[in-house]
Image (spheres, rainbow, N blue to C red):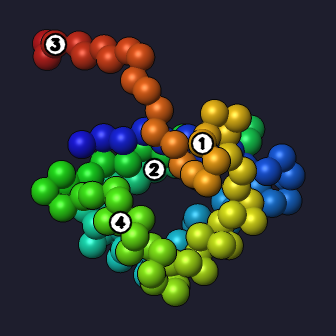
Amino acid sequence: MQHVLALDLKDDPALIAEYEAHHRAVWPEVQAHLRRHGVTEMKIYRLGTRMVMVMHTDDAVYDAARMQAASESDPVLVEWEALMWKFQAPTPWTPKGSKWIELQKVFDFRSPPV
């Protein structure tokens, strides 16, 4: 299944550059956590301070609540999330206490095979 989520970054070019540097070398424990919880592919795009994550999951394994709970109980993941929050900011539409928020699909075009 595909999930599309949004989050903002703090409007500071130095912080944005540091955030991107961290994502060129994501900790192996973070990547292992994603794999364990059924994330098969993840891409993050940025325009200014707005980020969009496209995540593909194996529905037989993926459970967002279970993945979040595991993140909150693993000291390495807690450290990664605290580090990332140094750079991140909620969007104006993000509920209090949340970070990445799932976007609503408004259009889906598929061209038939030729």
Of the numbered discs 4 and 1, the one sitting upstream in the chain is: 4
Do the CB atoms of the residues marked 1 and 2 lie less than 8 Å apart?
A: no
- Residue behind mark 2: 43
Disc nearest the viewer among 4 and 2: 4
Measured in 3D between alpha carbons, the distance from the residue under mark 1 to the one under mark 2, in whole angstroms, is 23 Å
Measured in 3D between alpha carbons, the distance from the residue under mark 3 to the one under mark 2, in whole angstroms, is 26 Å
* Quarter placement of the N terminus: top left
Measured in 3D between alpha carbons, the distance from the residue under mark 4 to the one under mark 2, in whole angstroms, is 18 Å
Q: Is residue 31 visible?
A: no
Q: Residue at x 20, y 54 (%)?
A: 58
Measured in 3D between alpha carbons, the distance from the residue under mark 3 to the one under mark 4, in whole angstroms, is 36 Å
Amino acid of disc 2: Lys
Q: Residue at x 59, y 70 (%)?
A: 81
- Residue behind mark 3: 112
**Above or below: residue 114 compared with residue 79:** above
Do the CB atoms of the residues marked 3 and 2 lie less than 8 Å apart?
A: no
**Above or below: residue 65 compared with residue 47:** below
Query: Which is nearer the eye, 4 or 44?
Result: 4
Of the numbered discs 1 and 2, the one sitting upstream in the chain is: 2
Disc nearest the viewer among 3 and 4: 4
Of the numbered discs 4 and 2, the one sitting upstream in the chain is: 2
Of the numbered discs 1 and 3, the one sitting upstream in the chain is: 1
Measured in 3D between alpha carbons, the distance from the residue under mark 4 to the one under mark 1, in whole angstroms, is 19 Å
- Residue behind mark 4: 67
Q: Secondary structure at mark 3?
A: loop
| Disc on res. 95 | 1
Q: Residue at x 70, y 35 (%)?
A: 92
